Amino acid sequence: MTEPFPPVVIREALPPELYAQLANEYPSINTVLSDSEVPQNNRRYQISAKRGLSTDILHESWREFVQYHVSPEFWGEVVVKLGPAIRHVYPKLEEQMGRDLGDFSLSVRGEAESDVVLDCQPGINSPVTRVSSVRGPHVDNPVELFAGLLYFRSPEDDSTGGDLVLHRHRRSSPTFWGKEGLWESDVEPFATIPYEANTLVLFINGLESVHAVTPRSLTQHPRRLVNFIGEIYGTGGLFKMPRDRSLSGRIKHRWFSWRYGG
């Protein structure tokens, strides 16, 4: 059994006045959706920093929020809060990149190449017409160094579920299916972070960083959250995900991708 990964959880992450303004001006479902998109049941939709900053779809308060969270100042905060954990999980990263974490070059995801590519994505999980989880146990893309979630739960949202569940592997040699998914029988939960307003979760992505979202009840309310991402492309992937390459394994892989979408 592997040791669980240590997330940083901050409740009341934003000052009350700022949070209230951002919550009041949170992008609507129609704003988040791309043109002609029709929301499907309990699915993730979001606005990338590139899209949000290059158009006028966001309120000025949100433009400033997004701009800050793809800036060198924000990366500096990440290094302070997560730097020791990054160096523990990826002890050779700075050597591979040829510079200290604090000196990594930065850019906005989708705009330019750099050591670290940042994104800040206001988004939603769409209303629920069939009880379901938006995502089962998984790790994030191997190019992703860190991830963050900031919840903007509406006061009117009386639904249940949508909590973030952290897992540990049951097997010493886990096998991944679909994109980055795992069978529920191969992991076990060790912590739950409720979907609560103004709660921030930050963690290092890696083989041990297994997480999922609990099923949401029927609701017309979206699950509102901001996704923070820092990706590194120059290493060819920060870690490898073991997969079953046998014929039966390939069949399971395809079934998992079809069933869970990832």
Image (spheres, rainbow, N blue to C red):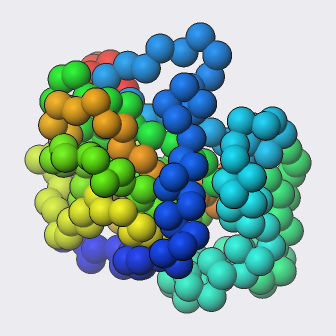
| Residue drawn where x is 52% and y is 35% of the image | 28
Q: Position of residue 66 (x, y in %)?
A: 70, 57
Whole-percent x and y of residue 141? 52, 48
Q: Is residue 120 above or below residue 42?
A: below
Front in this rendered view, residue 42 or 103: 42
Left or right: residue 92 versus residue 257 is right
When asked about the image quadrant of residue 168, the answer is: bottom left
The C terminus, quarter of image? top left
Residue at the limit of the structure toward the top, as seen here: 36
Can you say whether 215 is above or below 197 in the image? above
Instruction: Report whether residue 188 is seen.
Output: yes
Residue drawn at point x = 41 percent, y = 58 percent: 151
- At which x and y percent is residue 192? 21, 65
**Residue, x 31% and y 54% (percent of image)?**
155
Asked which quadrant contains residue 91, the reply is bottom right
Q: Is 131 or 110 nearer to us in this picture?
A: 131
Comparing 40 with 16, the one in front is 16
Residue at image point 30% right, 62% down: 196
Q: Position of residue 160 (x, y in %)?
A: 16, 47
Quarter of the N terminus within the rendering: bottom left
Q: Residue 235 versus residue 148: which sits nearer the camera?
A: 148
